[in-house]
Amino acid sequence: MPAARWRGKSARPRRPATDRPTAAASASIYALAAFFLILGAASLIVGAHDAALAQPTLGVTAAGALLLVGGILLVGAAVSLDHLVRRAAWKNRTRPPCHPTVLVACLVTIVFGAYVLFSGLGTPARQRWVVVAVALVIIGAAALGLVLFGRDVELTLPRVGTAVVLTLLGTAIGTWEFWYQNQYVPAHAGGAVSLKVNLTRAGEQGPFDVVRATVDYQAIGGKSVSAVGSVYSLTGSRIVRCPRSATVTQVQGAFKGALLDPQRIRFMADVLEQPPSVLAAGKFVADGKRLDPNVPADREFVFLVPKHRYQLLRFRAQLFAVPASVPLSDRMRPNYVTFPGDNELYGYWRIDDDSWLHDLLTGRERWLVMRYELVDPNSRASRQPAQVALVSQALHVIARFPNPTWSESPPSRTETQRMFSKGRTINSLELGSASEPFADSELPLESPVE
C-alpha cells in the first residue's frame, strides 16, 4: 500500500487526449528540436575548442565566444520545444505559443547559415560545395521553424530591440568571416612594403675594389607584414665602345617583347653593355621577419670586386611579404625542394591555424608556397642540369596560397608548378604590386674598353 501511494504521488497526471498534440505536430516539433540540439552541440564543441586555444587571434577568440553563446541558445530552444510537446496543454489539440527563445534561435540560425553560405561560396577549398549544401540545410530548417512558429511573436519594443541587436551581431560575424576569407583564401597575397637600395665604391683592397651596398625597407599602408621571401644580386658588366646612330631600327629593339631585364636591355649611342655576370646573390631579410608600419630597417653588404674586369656594377633587391595576420608556423620552418628538370627553388611553409571553425569552412591544411626563380624559364638554362646551368642576372621571388585541403602533405609537384604558371613571372620585373617591391642601383667603376 505505501508503495502504491508513492507511485501515485510521483506520477504525472496524463493529459486528456484532446490536450495532447497530434503525431504529425509532435514529429515536426521534435525534428526542429533535434536540429537545434545537434547544431547547438556542434557550436558548443567548436566554440569551446577555439576559445581554449593557446595563442588565438582576436578573430578566433571572438568567433569562439559567439559560437558558445549561440550553442547555449540553440540547446535552450531545443529544451523549450521538448517542453512544448511533452508538458504544455494543447487545448483541443491547438498548439500553444512557443517560448520566444525558439524564435530567436531561428533568426540566429538563419544569420549563421547565411554567412556559412557566403563563406563556402568564397573559398576555393575542395569542400566548398559540402559547406554550401550544409549552409542551405541550416537556412532551410531555420526558415521552416519561423514558418511554424512565426505567428507566435508579438511586436513589442523589447523584442524589436532584440531583433536589432541580433542583426548587428550577425553583421559583425559576417564582417569577420569576410575578413578571414580575404586574409587566407586568395591565390595571391601580399603586404605593402617600401624598398630602396644604394651602391657605392668604398675604396680598394689589394687587387679588389671595395663596394658597399645598402638595402632600406619598411612596411607601409598602416598594416604589419611578414617577409616570406627576399633576394638580392650583384652583377658586373663589361662596357665596350660602340658608336651608333639613334635610328628607329637601333632604338626599337629596347622596346620589343617582354624584356627579362628592361634596365640592361637599353639603347646607348656610344657604348654597348655585354651580358652581365652574377658576382653575388642571397637573401637580405630573415624568413618570417615581422615588419611593422613605418618602422625602417636596413641591411648593408660589402663586396670585393676584381679590378679592371668590370666597368659597370648593378645591385638588385626584391622582397615578398604577406599580411602579419597570417599565422606562419614557428614549429615547422620552410622546407625548400627542387624538382627534376626544373631549376627553380620551391619552399613550403605551413600555416598554423588550429581553429576548428576555419577547418570546417576552408580545410584543415593550409600552406604558403614560395618560388625563387633562379633562371629565366624561357632560356636554355631552364632545361640544363642544375650543376652547369647559370643563374639569371635578374633573380625573382614570389609566393602563392594553394587551395586548403584535408591532407597533411604539402601540395604536389604538379599542383605547385601549376600555381606559378599563371600571373606574374620572371619576365615582369617592373612590378605593379606593392607586395613585391623591386629596387636597383648602378655603379660605374671604369671607363669603357675598346
Image: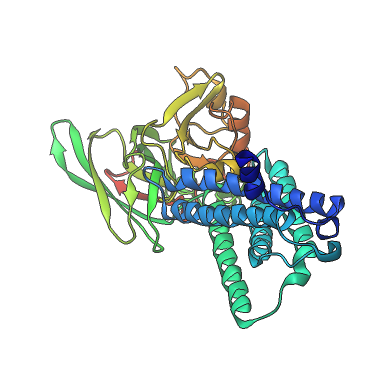
Q: How is the image coloured?
A: rainbow
Residue 365 position, x and y percent, is: 54, 35
User: Looking at this view, is 405 or 203 the one in front?
Assistant: 405
Give me the residue at 44% from left, 27% from top. Answer: 336
**In the image, is 311 to the left or to the right of 404?**
left
**In the image, is 196 to the left or to the right of 172?**
left
Of all residues, the one furthest to the front in this rendering is: 1
**In the image, is 157 to the left or to the right of 353?**
right
Quadrant containing the C terminus is top left
Give me the residue at 41% from left, 63% from top. Answer: 221
User: Looking at this view, is 364 or 267 the one in front?
Assistant: 364
Residue 170 position, x and y percent, is: 59, 64
Quadrant containing the N terminus is top right
Q: Quadrant of residue 127?
A: top right
- Image vertical order of residue 163 relative to residue 172, above or below: below
User: Looking at this view, is 273 or 204 the one in front?
Assistant: 204
Residue 373 appears in the figure: no
Residue 163 position, x and y percent, is: 62, 72
Residue 197 position, x and y percent, is: 32, 51
Number of labelled discs?
0
Give me the residue at 37% from left, 45% from top. Answer: 55
Of all residues, the one furthest to the bottom in this rendering is: 157
- Image vertical order of residue 228 relative to residue 86, above or below: above
User: Looking at this view, is 149 or 384 the one in front?
Assistant: 149
Give me the residue at 83% from left, 55% from top. Answer: 25
Residue 256 appears in the figure: yes
